[in-house]
Structures are given as C-alpha cells and as structure tokens.
C-alpha cells in the first residue's frame, strides 16, 4: 500500500519536476573560446548517471548548466545498460553518480550531489 502511494505521488509530481528542471536551468557562464575548448575536452572524460526526476540529479544538472559543462548524461533509470554499468563500476544503483576517467584509463565513481557539485566547481569554475 505504501509503495503504491509513493508510486502514484511520483507520477503526479513528475511533470512538475521536469518543468522545474527546465525552467530553473541557470544561464551558463561565459568563457573565452580557448577556455571553453579546454572545458569541453576535460568534460569528455566525465559522465553523469542520473534519474530524470531525481531532485538531487536536477541540482547537479543545474550546476553543470551554470558552469557550461557538456557532460554526457546517462539515464540509469530507463536504460538497462547504463544501470548495469553503474552497478558494476560504482557498486550500487544510486544517483547522481559522476564517472570520472583519466588519460591512463583509471575510473573513479563519485556519489552524492554535494560532492559532485563541489568537484565540478573546483575543477571548472576558474577556467576562463
């Protein structure tokens, strides 16, 4: 009974969450063309595993928008391949999760929206 209640609540709130996610998206920061190219190259090594209507995922996507980061989004809710990759790599199906790879092929899985937003701010906010 409780499970059905929350499922119905989620269905009712979903359109509002998606509308909020779209309308509240901040304007991206402006960088020099060279700075933005550097950010785009570094962002290619990142992927965000997310659920579209998860409020914590929305917060991270807003921060990505604010920092003008073209990070690949991977839907772990509806795409079974992404869900399996998240479980295999990160050890749990929890979103948001940022997959960070480096030039040597090392991969780090970062959970928790606050940690992800802090990482993105430290890595990209100063690039002009």
Image (cartoon, rainbow, N blue to C red):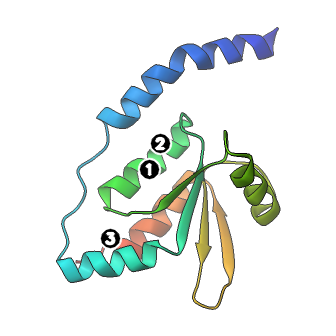
Q: Nearer the viewer, mark 1 or mark 3?
A: 1
Q: What residue is disc 1 on?
A: 61
Q: Residue at x 68, y 83 (%)?
A: 106
Q: Residue at x 71, y 10 (%)?
A: 5
Residue 62 screen position, x and y as percent: 38, 48
Left or right: where 30 falls relative to 102 = left
Residue that lies at the very extreme toward the bottom in this rendered image: 104
Residue toward you, 34 or 112: 34
SS at mark 3 in the image: loop
Q: What residue is disc 3 on?
A: 125
Q: What residue is disc 2 on?
A: 58
Disc 1 residue crowd, few under 14, some 14–19, many 20+, Cα 10 Å? many
Q: Residue at x 79, y 17 (%)?
A: 3
Q: Nearer the viewer, mark 2 or mark 3?
A: 2
Residue toward you, 44 or 13: 44
Residue 54 screen position, x and y as percent: 57, 37
Residue 93, which numbered label? none
The residues bearing labels 1 and 3 have C-alpha atoms spaced at a distance of 15 Å
Residue 85 screen position, x and y as percent: 75, 59
Q: Are marks 1 and 2 in contact (CB under 8 Å)?
A: yes
Left or right: where 58 falls relative to 91 = left
């Amino acid at each position: 009974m409780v499970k059905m209640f929350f499922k119905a609540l989620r269905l009712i709130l979903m359109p509002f969450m998606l509308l909020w996610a779209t309308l509240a998206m901040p304007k991206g920061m402006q960088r020099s063309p060279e700075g933005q190219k550097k950010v785009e190259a570094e962002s290619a090594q990142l992927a965000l595993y997310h659920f579209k209507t998860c409020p914590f995922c929305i917060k991270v996507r807003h921060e990505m928008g604010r920092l003008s980061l073209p990070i690949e989004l991977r839907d772990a809710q509806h795409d079974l391949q992404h869900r399996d990759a998240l479980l295999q790599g990160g050890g749990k199906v929890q979103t948001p999760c940022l997959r960070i790879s480096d030039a040597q092929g090392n991969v780090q899985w970062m959970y928790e929206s606050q940690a992800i937003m802090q990482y993105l701010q430290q890595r990209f906010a100063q690039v002009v």
